[in-house]
Image (cartoon, grey):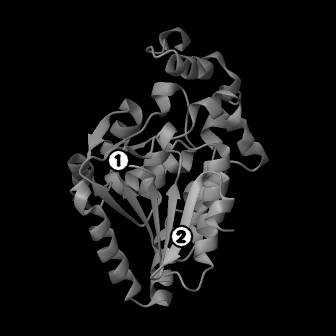
């Protein structure tokens, strides 16, 4: 599949690096079902390419890595597509199992699904204009449980709960202090920094890297059981069809604060 065959991505390979770019700048690189399917295929493709030693994942433009799930797609019933194979889990599984280091390169917003896509990568390199955070309770859209649980491995229990429960925004420097990223550099120096990390990774034993990555990832296998949506199904099995879920999406489009008080019980 060449770059031209992707609707939502740019894909290129050179110097041992596969560069995958979410190419939806008008929507701040929001992730629709099409985007997630293409991301999964692109990561798997790079993982199976013997000429590739490291994968770089980024977003088009300087305003956003990804602003998260495409709310328009979700409002039109997109979240229910996860029951027919379109869901964030496949993308995250592709990152975990591709056998090669994946670097998230973050410029601008990494919010919601964009944030946990970045923290699931092996390395995160951020520009100084990066902004990280979660959106779920703010827009009435819960993430799969293992994506939430894994965040406490990244930033610690208290900071993870703050990030997910309060939906705060974090600057690049705050994210560095929390452990959401490995390094922060000026936007103008970002490409050079990424090239340096890629060259260093490509100088190392690829088989050893694959073993090390699998060792790290084996530690979170149990988080996916008994099912990725276990708690949502247990607490609110029809949540995505509920008025509470719809209120979050409608408030977003109407540019107002959602009224979630009415749903307390």
Residue 49 vs residue 113: left or right? right
Callout 2 crowding tier (Cα within 10 Å): few <14, some 14–19, many ≥20: few
Circles 1, 2 touching at the beta carbon (< 8 Å)? no
Q: Residue 194 location, x and y as percent?
A: 33, 69
Residue drawn at x 47%, y 87% is: 206
Q: Is 12 placed above or below 238 here?
A: below
Residue 63 vs residue 99: left or right? left
Disc marking residue 12 = 2
Q: Residue 17 location, x and y as percent?
A: 47, 76
Q: Is 1 placed above or below 68 here?
A: below
Q: Which residue is mark 1?
A: 157
Label 2 sits on a secondary structure element that is: strand
Label 1 sits on a secondary structure element that is: helix
Nearest to the observer: residue 172 or residue 164: 172
Quarter where residue 73 is shown: top right
- The answer to whether one can see residue 225 in this image is no
- The answer to whether one can see residue 243 in this image is yes
How far apart, in angstroms, are the residues tagged by discs 1 and 2?
37 Å
Nearest to the observer: residue 63 or residue 126: 63
Label whose residue precedes the other's in the sequence (1 or 2): 2
**Quarter of the image that includes the N terminus:** bottom right
């Amino acid at each position: 599949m060449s770059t031209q065959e992707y609707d939502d991505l740019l894909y290129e390979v050179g110097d041992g690096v596969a560069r995958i770019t979410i190419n939806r700048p008008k929507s701040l690189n929001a992730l629709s079902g099409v985007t997630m399917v293409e991301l999964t295929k692109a990561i798997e493709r790079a993982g199976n390419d013997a000429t590739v030693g490291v994968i770089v994942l980024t977003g088009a433009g300087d305003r956003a890595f990804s602003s998260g799930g495409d709310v328009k797609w979700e409002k039109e019933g997109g979240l229910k597509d996860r029951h027919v194979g379109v869901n964030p889990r496949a993308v995250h599984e592709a990152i975990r199992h591709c056998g090669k280091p994946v670097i998230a390169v973050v410029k601008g917003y990494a919010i919601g699904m964009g944030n946990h896509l970045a923290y699931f990568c092996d390395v995160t390199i951020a520009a100084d204009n990066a902004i990280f955070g979660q959106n779920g309770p703010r827009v009435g859209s819960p993430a799969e449980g293992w994506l939430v649980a894994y965040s406490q491995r990244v930033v610690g229990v208290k900071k993870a709960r703050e990030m997910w429960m309060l939906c705060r925004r974090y600057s690049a420097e705050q994210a560095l202090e929390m452990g959401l990223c490995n390094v922060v550099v000026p936007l103008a120096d970002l490409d050079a920094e990424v090239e340096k990390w890629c060259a260093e990774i490509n100088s190392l034993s690829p088989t050893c890297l694959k073993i090390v990555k699998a060792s790290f990832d084996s530690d979170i296998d149990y988080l996916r059981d008994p099912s990725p949506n276990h708690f949502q199904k247990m607490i609110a099995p029809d949540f995505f069809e509920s008025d509470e879920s719809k209120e979050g999406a409608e408030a977003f489009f109407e540019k107002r604060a959602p009224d979630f008080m009415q749903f307390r019980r």
